[in-house]
Amino acid sequence: MSKIILVTGPARSGKSEWAETLALQSGKTVVYVATAYENIADIEWCDRLTQHKLRRPQNWLTLEIPVALGATVGEATAQNCLLVDSLGTWVANLLEQDEEIWLQVVQDFLVTARHCEGEIIFVAEETGWGVVPAYPIGRTFRDRLGSLVRRLSTISDAVYLVTGGHVLNLSALGSPLPELK
């Protein structure tokens, strides 16, 4: 069985750094799974990706998996710690999928995560604390990511909220709601 850790929080809160710290503490071989597409036309995005790359230890293996995340998670081994950064980017990459297909992708992903080997650390953005998005695609993104994070938290061994540069262990502070169907 896997050990699942979920690290969530708003943009620029420190969630990736906390996830990286946890991965280092695992003592296992770290496999960093980047879900972002590199868009050379977006200089600011490329700068963000570069900062992430520079922060990672040289001995970490990096996989760029923008879509087939479930298959990658299913290949995790007991010797590895998979660090997936981030679920929000993965959701965005699959946003055009029909709702029925998306729900099946999520179900398959959660079953795979629950039954794979090794330790997996997921980084996810918190998007539901802001204003209601003005456009349907924004609301779909917010709702899909929020639902995914909630469902993943129910199978996680530890859930952390990182905000304002501080880490809160939500698993130690509260109880999960019943699992969404």
Image (cartoon, rainbow, N blue to C red):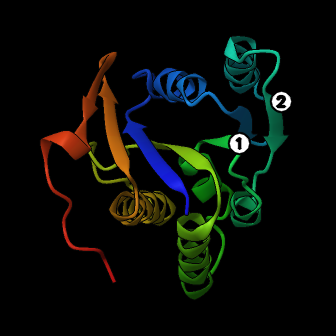
In this view of the protein, which residue sits in the foreground, 132 or 120? 120
Q: Nearer the viewer, mark 2 or mark 1?
A: 1
In this view of the protein, which residue sits in the foreground, 21 or 51? 21
Q: Residue at x 71, y 18 (%)?
A: 56
The mark found on residue 29 in the picture is none
Identify which amino acid the numbered label 2 is placed on.
Answer: Ala
For the C terminus, the quadrant is bottom left
Q: Quadrant of residue 126?
A: top left
Whether residue 24 is situated above or below residue 72 in the rendered picture = above
**Looking at the picture, how far across and down is residue 142, in whole percent?**
41, 57
Q: Residue at x 20, y 60 (%)?
A: 176
Residue that protrudes farthest toward the bottom in the picture: 100
Q: Secondary structure at mark 2?
A: loop
User: Is residue 38 in view?
Assistant: no
In this view of the protein, which residue sits in the foreground, 102 or 157? 157
**Looking at the picture, how far across and down is residue 36, in whole percent?**
72, 42
| CA neighbours of label 2 inside 10 A, class few (<14), some (14 to 19), many (20+) | few
Mark 2 = which residue?
Answer: 41
| Numbered-mark total | 2
**Looking at the picture, how far across and down is residue 97, in whole percent?**
65, 75
Q: Residue at x 61, y 64 (%)?
A: 95
| CA neighbours of label 1 inside 10 A, class few (<14), some (14 to 19), many (20+) | some
User: Is residue 83 in view?
Assistant: yes
Mark 1 = which residue?
Answer: 80
Earlier sequence position, callout 2 versus callout 1 = 2
Q: Is residue 77 left or right of residue 140?
A: right
Q: Residue at x 38, y 55 (%)?
A: 134
Q: Quadrant of residue 94?
A: bottom right
Q: CA distance from mark 2 to mark 1?
A: 34 Å
Identify which amino acid the numbered label 1 is placed on.
Answer: Asn
